[in-house]
Amino acid sequence: MPISTKTFNEQAIRGIARLTEQANAYQEQIATGKKDLRPSQDPVAAARLASVKDLEADVGRFTDNIGAAKTRLGLADTVLESVQTIMIRANELAIQAANGTNSQLDRQAIRAEIDQLRESMIGLANTADDRGQALFGGFVMRDTPFVKDRTGAVTYAGDSGQSAVLAADGLMLATGISGADAFMRVETPTGPVSVFDIFASLSAALDTADEAETSMSLSGGRARLEVATGRDPQLHAFTITGPLGSARISAELVAGATDALVDAINATSQATGLQATADTNTQAVILTAQGGGTISFRDYHIAGMRVATTPITTGMTITPLDGQNVASGPGRILADADHEIGKSIGMIQSGIEHLALQRARIGANYNAADIQSEALARKALVVAETRAGIEDADMAEVISKLQSLLVNRDAAQQVFAKLSQQSLFDFLR
């Protein structure tokens, strides 16, 4: 009978099985190049690896966010560059239109191109990114930010928010600028206007160039002034020149009332040599120059008007008169100074400078994204090295342990096989 017992056999088999399992584990490490970091095998290393993986995931998310931010910033800069090119072309056309040799037909041809450039600019302002989100809508990303009303005026339907992404713990990175900053707040001498209104103003100035003037002179010493204004008080100001000199006239006017204008002109009579009286029949002002000298008007500004309009609904019609206050020539419209093409040129140049500033802001944000991207790349490298140090297996050590383990397992198997076959007679022999 065998001298081995059932318990001995079971213990020996379990021991060999453990050695085989360990050998398999070493072989798996050789195949994958990774240590066995199950919590049951190495709880400390497993905890460290979990922490490193979380950090690695954060770096990945931040890197993706920065990539998306750089895509939006790059696209925004490209759009503003195109808008700037359009404004440079508009400036060239405005300078061309300001040439006094142009006919009204020539100005209408230029106006047609200006209107088309404005439409192109509206389309660019409504550009969306690769996710379908408006570039210049602020926090309102799903709607079209710039819309035209029934009069053709462009309004902003977005907000002044600045979209941003999380680029690191506690660090928000801007992904663009709002449409209000980019297109609606161009600083001009008359106040902030939109780039779309600048184009509309130039278009109106071109359209009304034949019917209105921004400065004029009349000989004969007498003129009738008829002001077109609304029912609400509105400040009208202009520079008037008579035989004695010039003065700045300023008066709040309402429809049908001329007293304020008469008083304002007469208050400067000693400086200008001009006298005003009210014509109650026509609700106009009769202007008379001492000695029948020349009367001139310039720099007409109407409060609330920042750009030219067409048709002209607010202005002053000036008619030359003879000695009996009968019209001696056709009436001419004195329009707000914004109807001067030269004013539009100045506003366009302000718009070009404004866009350059906005592009500089975008460039600064893009540079910040680049710097943070480089910092994350360095951090990702450190994290990768740390993770490798935790989970990468030492191949020479593992192979050495496997070879030693296989030798021990084979020896144990041989001993077990030999002992399990011996009987009591073999032991007594």
Image (cartoon, grey):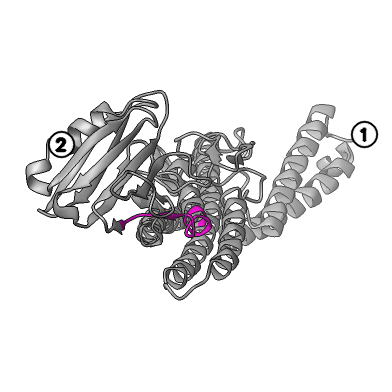
Q: Is residue 312 above or below residue 329?
A: above
Pick the residue in front: 209 or 50: 209
Which residue matches tag 2? 266
Region in magenta: 203-216
Quarter of image, res 231: top left
Label 2 sits on a secondary structure element that is: helix
The numbered mark, 2 or 1, whose residue comes first in the sequence reads 1
In the rendered view, does 211 fall on the left or right side of 112? left
Number of disc labels = 2
Q: Residue at the location (32% across, 57% down)?
A: 216
- Where residue 263 sits: x, y (%)? 19, 31
Which image quarter holds the N terminus?
Answer: top right
Label 1 sits on a secondary structure element that is: loop
Q: Is residue 349 above or below residue 286?
A: below
Membership of 104 in magenta stretch: no
Q: Residue furthest top?
A: 232
- Where residue 151 sits: x, y (%)? 60, 39
Disc 2 marks a residue whose amino acid type is Asn
